[in-house]
Amino acid sequence: MDLKIKLGPVVVLVFSVLNNLSAEGSIGRKQMRTDLNPVTFLKKPRHNPIVLVKEGKPQGYICVMKDLTGPLKTAVEELAETVELTTGARLPVLQKEIKKPALVIGDCPMAASNGLNGKKMPVEGFEIKTAEELVFVVGNDEPVAEGIISTGPVWGVIEFMERFVDVRWYWPKEHGGRSLNQKDELLVPPVH
């Protein structure tokens, strides 16, 4: 009786996992989910880290390559705010202009020359790639259906904040749900 009580949850868990695997037909072969974009890490470029904030002072710019409207505007405002709250430095936001060192958001000829094209990415897809003194956040922002536009660049900005600014959101920030770690530098290592 004691053994049955102790092993009961384990048996149920194993049975449940096996049941789910066999229901999806994935026992014995790898099955890829088609409802999520795959995460891939590509060979990173070779260059020095991009310094956006040093000793609490802005060194770089946030350069947005399209009009700031809707979700992209909200994401860029949150980015500027979280960088300032984290480092004490407010990065200037430029539109349709690149000044180095830069965090470049959106498609542009310079991103294309570095192999990034949002139109060729999957819906809601994005890439973060660095080059000398540049961090590119490029994503698919093409129409998906009438009145619906992919928000790949927005997801890219959120990923940048989580990975490099070290921000997390657990519930609405208005209720204290945003977690920040203080630092006096914002360095982005070579990534792709």
Image (spheres, helix red, strand yellow):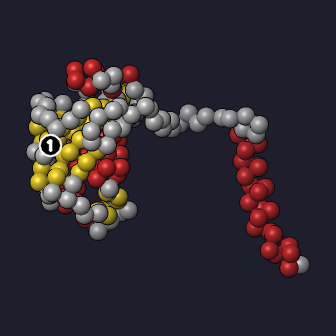
Farthest residue in the right direction? 1
Count of picture labels: 1
Say left or right for 94 vs 49: left
Residue 105 seen in the current view: no
Q: Amino acid at mark 1?
A: Gly
Q: Residue sitting at 35 percent across and 58 percent down?
A: 168
Residue at disc 1, secondary structure: loop
Closer to us: 69 or 49: 49
Q: Residue sitting at 21 percent across and 39 percent down?
A: 103
Residue 10's place in the image compared with 60, above or below, is: below
- Whole-percent x, y for residue 169 in the image: 35, 59
Residue 64 seen in the current view: yes
Closer to us: 50 or 35: 50
- Screen quadrant of the N terminus: bottom right
Q: Residue sitting at 74 percent across and 55 percent down?
A: 16
- Screen quadrant of the C terminus: top left
Residue 120, quarter of picture: top left
Closer to us: 139 or 113: 113
Farthest residue in the bottom direction? 2
Say left or right for 32 vs 133: right
- Whole-percent x, y for residue 100 in the image: 14, 35
Residue 48's place in the image compared with 162, above or below, is: above
Q: Residue sitting at 66 percent across and 35 percent down?
A: 31
Say left or right for 146 vs 8: left
Disc 1: CA contacts within 10 A as few (<14), some (14-19) or many (>=20): many
Closer to us: 146 or 70: 70
List the residue tagged with mark 1: 60
Residue 173, quarter of picture: bottom left
- Whole-percent x, y for residue 98 in the image: 13, 31
